[in-house]
Image (cartoon, rainbow, N blue to C red):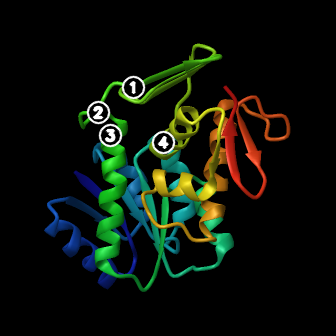
């Protein structure tokens, strides 16, 4: 598996590289976002770790440009800790956010979790065939395809996992805490509510689902989300 590291602090980039190479990953390391954009097409990346404050082109801009073409997981590792920065990164398409200083083993664990989900999404691991067909939605957990009105909806791995979880529990409210723990496979904390909200918003946009008059995903305020049967 190929991992892209974009980090202008050499010590941090080297630390990330050392720990990830120990896990058998191939590392492509850059200190310039501009250089990444020039060479990304030839790298066959499976996951990217981006710093926010990089020269010439900042990490947020790089993330936005990557998301226009690629669905591989993107993790931010940065000293910016304000909640608004985290939300902004997630809004642009990032999958996770780790603040400096960080424990290298935590970074490795998160990388593994996102790569596992990404491999499942791309059919690189064996999955039991499972298909949900109701109303005008067809979602297949084996092929990781989602059709709405017979039109294929291009979902990221996280978006697919969220929608699959809601669809398989259709008719019932899925608590935000339960949704987070099933999709992210991590312990839920109160601040994670914003993470879920951002991804739900992305999902609604792709489904062309108006949050005020939703056809698919309903918000149950203070509880979670629900898809009617």
Name the element at disc 2: loop
Can you say which quadrant of the picture contains the C terminus? top right
Within-10-Å neighbours for mark 3: few <14, some 14–19, many 20+: some
Q: Which mark is residue 120?
A: 3
Task: Please report whichever mark, 1 or 4, sits nearer to the chain's N-terminal start.
Answer: 1
Residue underneath mark 1: 130
Can the viewer see residue 57 in this picture?
no
The residue sitting at 62% across, 40% down in the picture is 203
219 left or right, relative to 13? right
Task: Please report whichever mark, 3 or 4, sits nearer to the chain's N-terminal start.
Answer: 3
Residue underneath mark 4: 161
40 left or right, relative to 229? left
Residue underneath mark 2: 127
Check if mark 1's residue and mark 3's residue have beta carbons within 8 Å: no
Compared to 174, does 149 lie above or below?
above
Name the element at disc 1: loop
Check if mark 2's residue and mark 4's residue have beta carbons within 8 Å: no
Give how far apart the Cα atoms at labels 2 and 4 are: 14 Å
Q: Quadrant of residue 29?
A: bottom left
Task: Please report whichever mark, 2 or 4, sits nearer to the chain's N-terminal start.
Answer: 2
């Amino acid at each position: 598996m190929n991992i892209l590291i974009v980090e202008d602090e050499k010590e941090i980039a080297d630390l990330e590289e050392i720990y990830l190479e120990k896990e058998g990953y191939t590392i492509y390391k850059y200190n310039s976002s501009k250089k990444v954009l020039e060479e990304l097409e030839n790298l066959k990346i499976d996951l990217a770790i981006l710093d926010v404050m990089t020269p010439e082109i900042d990490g947020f801009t790089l993330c936005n440009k990557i998301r226009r073409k690629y669905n591989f997981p993107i993790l931010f590792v940065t000293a910016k800790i304000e909640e608004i920065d985290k939300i902004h990164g997630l809004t642009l398409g990032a999958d996770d956010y780790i603040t400096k200083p960080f424990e290298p083993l935590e970074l490795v664990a998160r990388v593994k979790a996102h790569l596992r989900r990404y491999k499942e999404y791309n059919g690189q691991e064996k999955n039991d065939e499972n298909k949900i067909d109701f109303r005008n939605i067809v979602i297949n957990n084996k092929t990781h395809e989602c059709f709405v009105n017979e039109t294929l909806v291009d979902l990221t791995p996280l978006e697919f996992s969220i929608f699959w979880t809601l669809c398989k529990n259709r008719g019932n409210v899925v608590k935000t805490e339960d949704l987070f723990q099933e999709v992210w496979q991590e312990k839920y904390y109160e601040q994670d509510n914003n993470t879920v909200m951002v991804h739900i918003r992305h999902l609604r946009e792709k489904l062309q689902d108006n949050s005020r008059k939703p056809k698919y995903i309903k918000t149950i305020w203070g509880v979670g989300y629900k898809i009617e049967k």
